[in-house]
């Protein structure tokens, strides 16, 4: 999204969304766990390498707004222990139970009484920080971080495709859904440019990409995991919003003879900061 699109989206977004109800439906949480994009190994390595610059220990990471654990799992191979925290009981219920160094808890980003002060090497949040009380969350992150520990806030923008006709269909779909996003989601659209980590040593990485080859059923599942689709569908129960878009994409694939799969592309973005050692 360019600046004009972001400004337009901000005007169209809702200021009345009850964020406590956004990810409570079990079907939505299951779709989230099954179909949402998986972050690239390149992204996890970029964050871990940044952490090591001021703190070689990778003992404990806390993943805020972890959902069913996509980013939590990605950090598990680097840290001795990772704690995933989310306000949604259904999201936590869909998180993996069989990874020994992962722990998941229902909780709030600004209230982490189960984490001791000064014990955490990385506090991170993927695709969720826009929905959190940010000043209070930064204060709690500062409490639990070790001196030299790191904060990493990351996410991805709206999907597109290398196939122009499909890219146009996806873009139109998301513009239809904009009024069902909470206004805080513009922070995702502008790649967290407006978020200010309260440390002097802060950097960004906007160079990473995420590309997937998916089938129509995967696309439908991914879209049904998003809050705006859930909200739109509740307001328009007689429409098959996702199904109609999927049918149009299928028509494009049949017309072009490119087979049953198509590409989905995202731009990844990471905002990182080091807590001062002194």
Image (cartoon, helix red, strand yellow):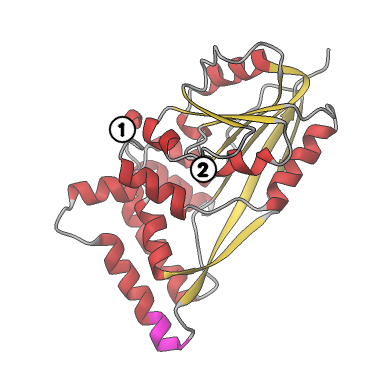
Which is in the foreground here, disc 2 or disc 1? 1
| Res 193 visible | yes
Q: On screen, 218 above or below 143?
A: below
Residue 118 x %, y %: 71, 13
Residue 63 x %, y %: 59, 31
Residue 3 x %, y %: 53, 49
The furthest residue to the left: 238
- Disc 2 crowd rating (10 Å Cα; few below 14, some 14-19, many 20+) is many
Viewer-closest of 1 and 277: 277
Element type at mark 2: helix
Residue 246 x %, y %: 34, 69
Q: Which circle's residue, 2 or 1, is located before the other in the chain?
A: 1
The part of the chain drawn in magenta is 252-257
Quadrant containing the C terminus in the rendered view: top right
Q: Residue at x 64, y 44 (%)?
A: 74
Viewer-closest of 264 and 178: 264
Viewer-closest of 3 and 1: 1
- Mark 2 and mark 1: span between their CA atoms? 19 Å
Q: Main secondary structure of the magenta part?
A: helix
Report if residue 60 lies within the magenta region.
Answer: no
Report if residue 254 lies within the magenta region.
Answer: yes
Q: On screen, 188 above or below 101?
A: below
Q: Is residue 150 left or right of residue 234?
A: right
Residue designated by label 1: 21
Element type at mark 1: helix
Q: Residue at x 62, y 34 (%)?
A: 100
Q: On screen, 119 above or below 219?
A: above
Residue designated by label 2: 188
| Res 8 visible | no
Q: Residue at x 27, y 45 (%)?
A: 231
Q: Is residue 87 left or right of residue 235?
A: right
């Amino acid at each position: 999204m360019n600046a004009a699109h972001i400004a337009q989206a901000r005007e169209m977004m809702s200021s009345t969304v009850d964020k406590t109800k956004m990810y409570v439906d079990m079907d939505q949480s299951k779709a989230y766990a099954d179909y949402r994009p998986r972050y690239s190994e390149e992204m996890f390595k970029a964050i871990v390498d940044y952490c090591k610059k001021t703190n070689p220990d990778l003992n404990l990471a806390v993943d805020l707004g972890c959902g069913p654990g996509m980013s939590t799992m990605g950090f598990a191979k680097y840290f001795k222990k990772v704690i995933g925290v989310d306000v949604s009981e259904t999201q936590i219920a869909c998180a993996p139970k069989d990874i020994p160094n992962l722990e998941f808890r229902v909780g709030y980003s600004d209230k982490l009484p189960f984490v001791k002060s000064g014990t955490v090497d990385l506090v991170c949040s993927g695709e969720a920080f826009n929905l959190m009380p940010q000043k209070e969350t930064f204060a709690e992150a500062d409490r639990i971080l070790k001196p030299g520990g790191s904060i990493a806030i990351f996410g991805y923008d709206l999907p597109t495709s290398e196939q122009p006709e499909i890219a146009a269909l996806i873009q139109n779909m998301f513009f239809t859904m904009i009024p069902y996003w909470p206004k805080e989601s513009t922070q995702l659209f502008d790649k967290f440019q407006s978020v200010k980590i309260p440390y002097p040593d802060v950097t960004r990485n906007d160079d990473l990409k995420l590309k997937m080859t998916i089938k129509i059923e995967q696309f439908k599942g991914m879209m049904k995991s998003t809050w705006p689709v859930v909200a739109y569908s509740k307001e328009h129960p007689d429409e098959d919003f996702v199904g109609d878009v999927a049918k149009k994409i299928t028509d494009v694939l049949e017309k072009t003879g490119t087979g049953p799969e198509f590409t989905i592309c995202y731009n990844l973005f990471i905002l990182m900061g080091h807590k001062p050692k002194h």
